[in-house]
């Protein structure tokens, strides 16, 4: 790579929800002119208002000077159509996680790029190579997976599609660094790296619930292990319907994933869709309290202290190894960085691969084998057995 600096003075962001608004704030803070587009000008302006709220909070905390707010906000230009999308150095779409919607947006907006510019999709799990089919030039198309809230989360996961050029990877990396982000570069596949491994964290929690392990034990051990957030609380925050939508976008589901899918469907049918509806795995009111599902097994299996945490830690590390062998990850260091900065893997471990090293490979394989009857997520690659 030449590492020639690419000029970012004017970019387009499509979708002024929490993700798009957060990216707009970071770009505006870096001195970049941002066209922030949504369906209506009111929605686009609401996206800009997010930056105002962040600024006021930072000023209150003493992390920003009051006089810095006006020039930052002046860099964000709410728009409701693509007429102003011209001579842009890059476009990032941050619309709802739906393949057809994203393809429509890509087709409608890409003519706004100047020569040499690139198009990025902020997606958590959709295949970049498939999205790139709607691009005029797939070599200039890439995934840039930001994390929420964008102004506080340091990681950007850059995803190469099958035809993404090295130059486009370099430009996307430069932009992420300008925004003050730490970058990992991964290759295309369902869920890429961070989302795929995080889905296993959530899946393992649901699997344990269905086995009869009490929700309070699962949540408590996850917190004690040092995870950024406990899995059932995360599912409520995501919302259960959105989790099903993510599963719907995957090319196929394992038996374990199908069991989880059916259980989430059952909860949604009971009106337990997550925090926004006031009830999910937790009940939300004056206080937040775990809900006990009377339909789950009442006699919990006998488990040793620390087994729940071990399952959550190991299942993510095991799938990270698969990602390395499948070529999703290029290096163990990217896996360690991505797991800690992107998906809340306990910092004290050093990351998923350092966790395997700390446990010791033979012991790690042996302990994973103990969970072989819990689902396909525990299948151990032959190459790992050989190394263990």
Image (cartoon, helix red, strand yellow):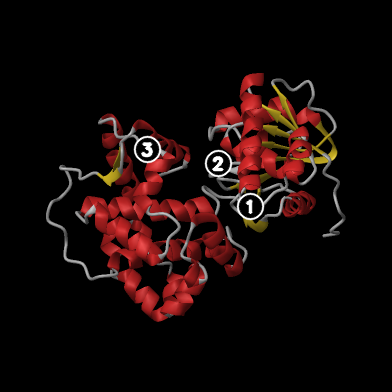
Classify mark 2: residues with Cα within 10 Å, few (<14), some (14-19) or many (20+): many
Q: Which residue is mark 2?
A: 126
Alpha carbon separation for disc pair 3 and 1: 26 Å
Asked which secondary structure carries label 3, the reply is helix
Q: From this viewpoint, is residue 230 visible?
A: yes
Q: Total number of numbered labels?
A: 3
Upstream in sequence: badge 1 or badge 2: 2
What is the x, y in percent for residue 322?
49, 63
Say whether residue 202 is left or right of residue 372: right
Alpha carbon separation for disc pair 1 and 2: 16 Å
What is the x, y in percent for residue 383?
47, 72
362 is higher (above) or lower (below) than 66: below
Say whether residue 225 is left or right of residue 218: right
What is the x, y in percent for residue 133?
66, 35
Based on the displayed image, in which of its 4 quarters is residue 330 positioned? bottom right
Classify mark 3: residues with Cα within 10 Å, few (<14), some (14-19) or many (20+): many
Based on the displayed image, in which of its 4 quarters is residue 120 positioned? top right
Q: Which residue is mark 3?
A: 275
Upstream in sequence: badge 3 or badge 2: 2
222 is higher (above) or lower (below) than 202: below
At 65% across and 36% down in the image, what residue appears?
Answer: 52
Q: Quadrant of the C terminus?
A: bottom left
At 50% across and 50% down in the image, what residue appears?
Answer: 195
| Disc ID at residue 156 | 1
Asked which secondary structure carries label 2, the reply is loop
At 76% across and 52% down in the image, what residue appears?
Answer: 178
What is the x, y in percent for residue 59?
66, 46
Q: Closer to the camera, 303 or 131?
A: 303
Q: Closer to the camera, 38 or 263?
A: 38
Asked which secondary structure carries label 1, the reply is strand
Alpha carbon separation for disc pair 3 and 2: 25 Å
Q: From this viewpoint, is residue 254 visible?
A: no
């Amino acid at each position: 790579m030449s590492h020639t600096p690419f000029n970012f003075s004017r970019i387009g962001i499509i979708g002024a929800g929490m993700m798009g608004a957060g990216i707009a704030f970071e770009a505006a803070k870096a001195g970049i002119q941002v066209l922030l587009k949504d369906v209506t000008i009111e929605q686009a302006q609401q996206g800009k208002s997010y930056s105002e709220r962040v600024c006021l909070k930072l000023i209150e905390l003493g992390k920003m000077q009051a006089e810095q707010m006006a020039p930052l906000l002046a860099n964000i230009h709410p728009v409701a159509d693509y007429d102003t999308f011209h001579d842009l150095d890059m476009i990032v779409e941050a619309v709802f996680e739906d393949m057809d919607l994203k393809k429509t947006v890509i087709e409608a907006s890409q003519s706004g790029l100047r020569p040499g510019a690139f198009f990025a999709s902020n997606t958590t799990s959709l295949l970049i190579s498939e999205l790139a089919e709607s691009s005029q030039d797939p070599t200039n198309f890439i995934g840039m997976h930001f994390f929420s809230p964008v102004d506080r989360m340091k990681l950007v996961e850059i995803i190469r599609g099958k035809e993404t050029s090295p130059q486009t990877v370099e430009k996307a990396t430069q932009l992420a660094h300008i925004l003050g982000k730490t970058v990992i570069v991964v290759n295309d596949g369902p869920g890429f790296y961070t989302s795929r491994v995080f889905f296993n964290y959530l899946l393992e929690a649901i699997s344990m619930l269905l086995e009869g392990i009490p929700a309070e034990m699962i949540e408590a051990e996850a917190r004690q292990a040092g995870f950024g957030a406990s899995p059932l609380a995360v599912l409520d925050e995501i919302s259960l319907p959105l989790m099903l939508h993510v599963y719907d976008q995957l090319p196929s589901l394992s038996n374990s994933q199908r069991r989880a899918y059916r259980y989430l469907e059952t909860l949604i049918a009971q009106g337990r869709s997550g925090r926004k509806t006031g009830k999910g795995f937790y009940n939300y009111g004056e206080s937040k309290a775990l809900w006990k599902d009377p339909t789950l097994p009442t006699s919990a299996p006998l488990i040793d202290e620390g087994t729940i945490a071990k399952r959550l830690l190991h299942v993510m590390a095991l799938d990270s190894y698969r990602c390395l062998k499948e070529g999703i990850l290029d290096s163990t260091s990217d896996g360690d960085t991505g797991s800690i900065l992107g998906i809340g893997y306990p910092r004290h471990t050093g990351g998923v691969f350092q966790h395997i090293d700390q446990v010791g490979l033979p012991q790690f394989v042996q302990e994973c084998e103990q969970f072989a009857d819990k689902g396909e997520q525990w299948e151990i690659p032959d190459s790992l057995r050989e190394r263990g």
